[in-house]
Amino acid sequence: MKQEDKKGTIQDINGPIVTIKLPGVQNGEQVRIGSLGLYGEVISLEGKEALAQIYESTEMVRPGEPAEGLGHPLSVELGPGLIGGIFDGVQRPLEAMFLKAGDQIPRGLSPLPLDREKLWHFSPTENLEPNMPIIGGARIGVVQETETVEHRIIVPPNIEGELIELAPEGDYNLEETIGQVRDRHGKVHHLKLYHRWPVRKPRPYQSRDNGVEPLITGQRILDTFFPLLKGSKCAVPGPFGAGKTVVQHQVARWANADIVIYVGCGERGNELVDVLDSFPKLKDPYTGRPLMDRTLLIANTSNMPVVAREASIYVGITIAEYYRDQGYDVVMLADSTSRWAEALREVSGRLGQMPVEEGYPAYLASRLAAFYERAGRVETMDCGKGSVTLIGAVSPPGGDFSEPVTSHTKEIIQTFWALSKELADARHYPAIDWVDSFSADVGTAAEWWHENIDRGWEKRRAQALGMLARDAELSRIVNLVGPEALSSAQRWVLEGAALIKEGVLQQSALDQVDTFSSPEKQFMLLNLILSVYDEGTALIELGVPVQELPEMPILARLRRCKELYDSSQIDQLKAFRDEALNDFKEIHSEYAQRGEQTA
Amino acid sequence: MSAKEYRTASAARGGLLTVANVPNIAFGDRVYIRDKQGNTRNGQVIRSSNEEVLVQVFEGTAELDLESTWVRFLDEPVEIALSPEILGRVFSGLGEPRDYRPPIVSNLRRSISAAAFNPAARTYPKEFIQTGISTIDGLNSLVRGQKLPIFSASGLPHNRLAAQIVRQAKLPDDDSRFSVVFAAMGVSYADARFFQEEFASSGVLGNVVMFVNMADDPPVERLTLPRMALTAAEYLAFDLDRHVLVVMTDMTHYAEALREVATAKGDVPARKGYPGYLYSDLAEIYERSGRIKDRHGSITLVPVLSMPSDDITHPIPDLTGYITEGQIVLSRELHNQGIYPPVHISPSLSRLMKDGIGKDFTREDHPHVSNQLYALYARALETRNLASIIGADELSARDRRYLEFADAFERRFVQQGEDEDRSIEETLNLAWDLLSSFPPQALIRVNETEIAKYHRQSE
Ligand SMILES: Nc1ncnc2c1ncn2[C@@H]1O[C@H](COP(=O)(O)OP(=O)(O)O)[C@@H](O)[C@H]1O
Ligand SMILES: [Mg+2]
């Protein structure tokens, strides 16, 4: 027991909101209540009484039972052993809980998040000598956390001073001291392989940078049409069944990030099992290592207590910032931020706060903004670069994007991947609507694509979007007056748009080949289809009847290219392109000859 | 157990009773309320402090007077007694016998509000269940441990469909039957009788546990009923190693009862008067299905709900769809055309079919065939729409093929007999009959090998 422990009693239990009499307790402080020792946190103080939200079910808790303050706010443990794990919304290790307590999550149990016995091989940073000044965030050494992730041990951000001692290379557990720092008050801090950080407090950095390169997700509609920069923020709204979770899983699988943090916030248990089962078997396309070696899961499923759901995204983002501070590009996915907002609503309702829209409290918008603000590309305390890219699913009731969570989120984010029920119903996956979606970073992304893939990227992208827009317009006409009203060129636009939809936009997450498309392959496919379209347009100008073109056998194969050639088969794709264009050339010269003969 | 009895009721409002000066009462405790006539009502503590305790009275507080009401706190949560004897029995929403037979006597009693399953304890559901219904097996496959609701509306044959699923559901190459837990909330006598006769005539009655709350029973018992039923299901699945199929009808009545109580409590409403926690509350129920590591049994959940005014965006179907692993949606339009089962495939979905079908599970072409039918039908519906505007004669030959496909699909694939139990093989072959009306190059969701093997023109 620590000295500063505070003792008190429970006054009133109102579901997850419990009033306690606990003199000296601070706002935000962690508490344990009742004979089971349930965990919670103080959310307001009123005179001698404190209101606490409890992360676990309060069933059978009674007034008069004890309560104690733990002297610190909700914090996470940051150190090696995080990656590959699955934790609940307040960072309890779920594997360990399963082994210890069985199928269901018992109350009051709180094993430490990180394994204390495991030994980690620590190599200190060279050139670090005793008596050197050292700042918070400085790297003092590394530990190989998984095959892929080198865990950089950093001085906790709130410690600064003079390095007195640094442990030599060797095996250490988490509780052993690996360094000592004397701060300017003369206090000596023992550094370990891990430290704790309060989740509601953003971790510091030197300065913010603009995003410079896109996060490559391997998903054509995302990378090519609605790019997201590393360090940016993005929302994925859509009604149920439209594909939010699949989009997030796909990004978690194929994005070129160093670390992926997936927060299942108020969603299905089986979706986390899916990740746990499939990721160890999948290979990171960039490193060839099992994907689980860079992934961490936070799980507060829909049936778990709602207050811990509110905490879960802060736990996730704090861990994300921690790896950012090590100089990594981190992607954090939150599925779904709406469930988090609902948890806010639930607590505010119990507190009797004035609801403003659909029961949500007035502070919804500012909380959302503050959360997304923790994304970003930064210069870390020790002058490296790191980023946190934040992608939040949004689950609007009834699929109505004008509801509070969607509309507030939309004002904050840079990239918006809007999912459509109509597309999903037609099994056009990913069901991302190319009209409603947007990216504010196309310009920056274009620089990257032009430099690394092809100078024609921005033009081809614009051409494709233009054709999709014309397609929508022409389809409206057809629906009014029938297809006969269209000119040949117009009908070829419809055909071309169909090719773009089937050959580029649609991408099956379940197809072994199609599930991932490298940027090269993405551009090849787009360019290929648009070249074919351009050739067709030229033929039509020459007088070739438009109905002949869709029957060309090469077009059926063109639609299948995405799943016939994987990302390493760029040469085969080029050969196919030559073949396809050749077919068109033949018709071209045939007609040109005929034209000359009749002339 | 030390039951405490008090006569200090200080207020009664709606379904809520306030009791003053009762120290140390547990939150969530069960309560018996005895009125002047000596009749007992049931309740539960929903807020507790030393000054006063708020009790939700399941039967309501009508005709209670504050002076002569006795309130007894049982000091235990709502529980159900469990033994293998529950099979073949009928219980109320409070777990009391409804079949004029004695209560279950057992040392094993469990609280009906179970703690959440640890996600790390779950295994991913993968075993294909053949229901013999093409729109489900072929296009929205059900797997063991899945939660797959039927979205229906008044007057549509959801009961008949649910009964057909109960009758026919099995694993291919495995004759072991499911045990059935049937949970009925706010149902009519006719509906209750329908299911009882169904179970009797198909000889499964001895393998069914029924929990029944009629339309004229206290609505508030609908709140405990699904939790009773699922606690029984968990016992059958994870203690007795059985595969359990839980059918719940009608979840809309459940949600309405929840709204009634929430309103009485003064909870802040979110949409259409439903409390903001409806999502979490439904999730507590639906997430109790699934498969657990090292356990032989499973819980497959088929909730039935009626969409108020046929509106799929109404909070009840909407929140359900956000929680369950897909949905089977029934259509009034198909029903009016005499098509049974009137499954509207476009909004229907099974999220778990991806891992339970295909090579080694059903047949290698299954995933692609399903996708192809979906894509063609979506296009066909657009064409039908176009035809209704400009007239079918104006359509191109290509478009007319889609129109014919839509009709054939509905008449031959969707429609089937109530006793017609199609094997997955039959369902897929039927699908290829329909696909073969298109030339191979129009079918890009199936691959070339599959076309060579199954397309009729390639024969
Ligand atoms: N890119 C995709 N490829 C294949 N199937 C998809 C894709 N996106 C979505 N789906 C299908 O849609 C279903 C629902 O997607 P999901 O992401 O779970 O929806 P949401 O999270 O929006 O409710 C999935 O189970 C899957 O069958
Ligand atoms: Mg989802």
Image (cartoon, rainbow, N blue to C red):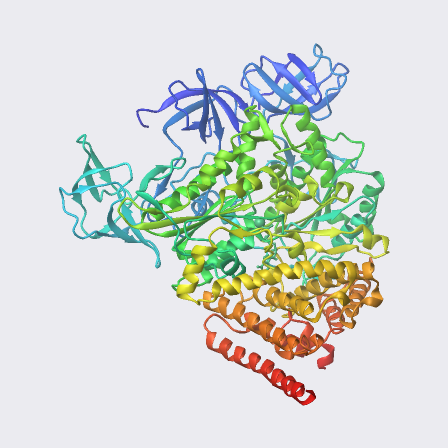
Q: Which residue is at a point 64% across and 71% down the rendered structure image?
A: B444
Q: Is residue A292 left or right of residue A156?
A: right
Q: Which residue is at a point 49% across and 29% down the rendered structure image?
A: A53
Residue B84 in view (yes/no) = no
Q: Which residue is at a point 13% across and 41% down the rendered structure image?
A: A131
Corner quadrant of residue A29: top left
The relative height of residue A481 versus residue A528 in the rendered view (above or below) is: above
Q: Position of residue B405 (x, y in %)?
A: 78, 67
Residue A599 in view (yes/no) = yes
* Quadrant housing the N terminus of chain A: top left
The relative height of residue B35 versus residue A592 in the rendered view (above or below) is: above
Q: Position of residue B243 (x, y in %)?
A: 65, 52
Corner quadrant of residue B334: bottom right
The relative height of residue A216 versus residue A395 in the rendered view (above or below) is: below
Q: Is residue B404 left or right of residue A469?
A: right
Q: Nearer the viewer, residue B269 or A88?
A: B269
Q: Position of residue A43 (x, y in %)?
A: 46, 26
Label total for image: 0
The relative height of residue A539 versus residue B173 in the rendered view (above or below) is: below
Q: Nearer the viewer, residue B294 or A318?
A: A318
Q: Position of residue B65 (x, y in %)?
A: 73, 13
Farthest residue in the top direction?
B67
Q: Is residue A94 left or right of residue B81?
A: left
Farthest residue in the bottom direction?
A597
* Quadrant housing the C terminus of chain A: bottom right
